[in-house]
Each structure stands twice: as structure tokens, then as C-alpha cells.
Image (cartoon, rainbow, N blue to C red):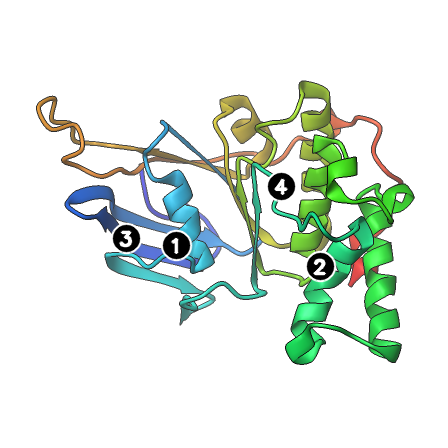
Amino acid sequence: MTGTAAGAAPAFVEVKRLAVTYGDAPILEGVSVGVAEGALVTIVGASGCGKSTFLRILLGQERPTGGTVAIDGAPIAPEPDPNRGIVFQKSSVFPHLTVRGNLMLPFEIAGGGPLARLFGARRRAARQKADAMMERIGLAHAADRYPAQLSGGMQQRLALGQALLPRPKILLLDEPFGALDPGTRREMQALLVELWRETGMTVFMVTHDIQEAFDLGTRILVFDKIRHDPQHPHAYGATITYDIPLKGPVAEALRPATPANLNVKDAF
């Protein structure tokens, strides 16, 4: 089943007849879905079926070949903006900046002028917000470390904090925990659910772990091809073949030792 789930709230993200083609190879075709504000949507499907492409479309990093995408009733901005944050499987933080420097960067870029630097009261305010986020994601003790001095889980905590600081309406996650060991992965899952609950943001998360998809999501989308040609395996694109509403994240079942439960709004 596809489309907006029965009984769902009005769509905040509305995708209609989305199509993406690379050269003469269709990647996505006929993708239509409406997602309510505040949903945590997990996305699964075989490798190469267009899941990451779908995220890049929502980010504004890539333009569709056909169809439309609207956010809160308006056409999606053609380029990435602060309303849409993203975290990749491999940490995308800046290696030459410390933990605090990475967390201050969104404020530097937004208000620092052509040199992307803040001064005086504005810099102090940005530092306070960065420090509050460090506390929230459990990295206050590592404020002056560089990413290369952090574990994989700590790097992903930093990437998540950096993505959240501009207060995005939509957070896009592309296999964010796929490279982590099982224990660290569960810690990050719990942290994600807590931050999602506190902020009310809308989340789209691609994962290859079906259990993770069911545990974390309020809704799961399955991408697959509905037409196959053995002689021409790339002849058709993928679409949403299943759209399943879920009972919601099970953060209580993911309760490892996490940082003190500070309010993430303190970081804003």
C-alpha cells in the first residue's frame, strides 16, 4: 500500500509522482507520499533502489526528473537550507575544528558575514548554545578535542548535534548508525528518539536494519521495484511498495547509560 496512511494528520511533506532518471536509467518512478509533521519515518529497501536519492531530493541537493515535492504547502527550496539537516553514515563534521568549533559553525555561517566569524555578544551567545548542545549529546568533556580524537559513536553524536543546532524542521538520516558497534548503536538510537521527542522535528531515516526501522519509526516506507525485466534489470525504477504505520519508537527498550536528560531546547 502506498500514499498517506489512513487516518494520518494533514501532510507536512507532500511528494507526488516523483521520478528520477540518470541518463536512460530510471531510479525512482511514481513515488507519492504524504507525511505528517513530527513523524519519524524509517525507509528500507534493497541496495540501489533509490533510498538515498529520495533523501537528496528532500534535502534539495538533487532535482527530480518529474513530479513535485512540497514542504508545509510550499515547493521545496531548490538548494539545502537550515530547515533541513542531514547526518550521513560517515561523519561529515569538519576535521580541522574542535567539538565546540563544529557546534558553533552553524551560527558562524548564519550570522558571521563573509568571513563566517562572530564577535562579541553574538559569539558568546553562540558558544553558550554550543556548550548546551555538548552537554545534551554527552560531549562536554571533549569540547577541545578534534574529530580524529573521538570514537565513531562520539563523532556521530557530534554530527547529530551540529545538524540539530539550526533547528531544522526536517532531519534526514542516511544510515547514520550503520558503522557503529551494537552497543554504541543502541545508545545513538535512544538519543535520536529522545531528541526527536523533545524537538518535534520530522525525521526521515534510511536504514538497512529492518529491526531498527520497526523499533524507531512511527511509520515505515519500503522502496522496491514493482516491475522487473530479467533481460534489462535497470529498465524500471523503484517506488514505495509498502507504507506501514507503526505504534511508535520504543525508546524505553533502548535505555542504555546516556547523558543526563537535559532539555535539548536549552541548546537553542
Question: Callout 2: 10 Å neighbours few (<14), some, many (20+)?
Answer: many
Give the CA distance from mark 1 to mark 3. 10 Å
Distance from Cα at disc 1 to Cα at disc 2:
22 Å
| Mark 3 element type | strand
Q: Secondary structure at mark 4?
A: loop
> Where's residue 246, x and y in %?
52, 34
- Mark 1 residue type: Ile
Decide which of tag 1 and tag 4 comes sooner along the chain. 1
Residue at mark 3 = 18
Q: Earlier in the sequence, mark 4 or mark 3?
A: 3
Q: Residue at x 61, y 46 (%)?
A: 92
Element under label 1?
Answer: helix
Dot 3 and dot 2 residues touching (CB under 8 Å): no
According to the image, label 2 marks what residue? 165
The amino acid on which the numbered mark 4 sits, given as a three-letter code, is Ser
**Which residue matches tag 1?**
57
- Marks 1 and 2 close (CB-CB < 8 Å): no
| Kind of residue at badge 2 | Leu
Residue 5: tell me if it is visible. Answer: no
Residue 4 percent location from the top left of the image: 38, 48
Decide if residue 33 is in sight here: yes
Left or right placement of residue 55 versus residue 198 in this view: left
Do labels 1 and 4 touch, CB within 8 Å? no
Residue 91 shows which numbered tag? 4
Q: Is residue 3 left or right of residue 231?
A: right
Point out the frontmost of discs 3 and 2: 2
Camera-nearest label, 4 or 2 = 4
Residue at image coords 49%, 63%: 80
- For badge 3, the amino acid type reads Leu
Q: At 26% from the left edge and 50% from the top edge, which residue is drawn?
A: 20
Q: Is residue 106 left or right of residue 2?
A: right
Instruction: Residue lying at the far front in this picture: please name it.
Output: 96
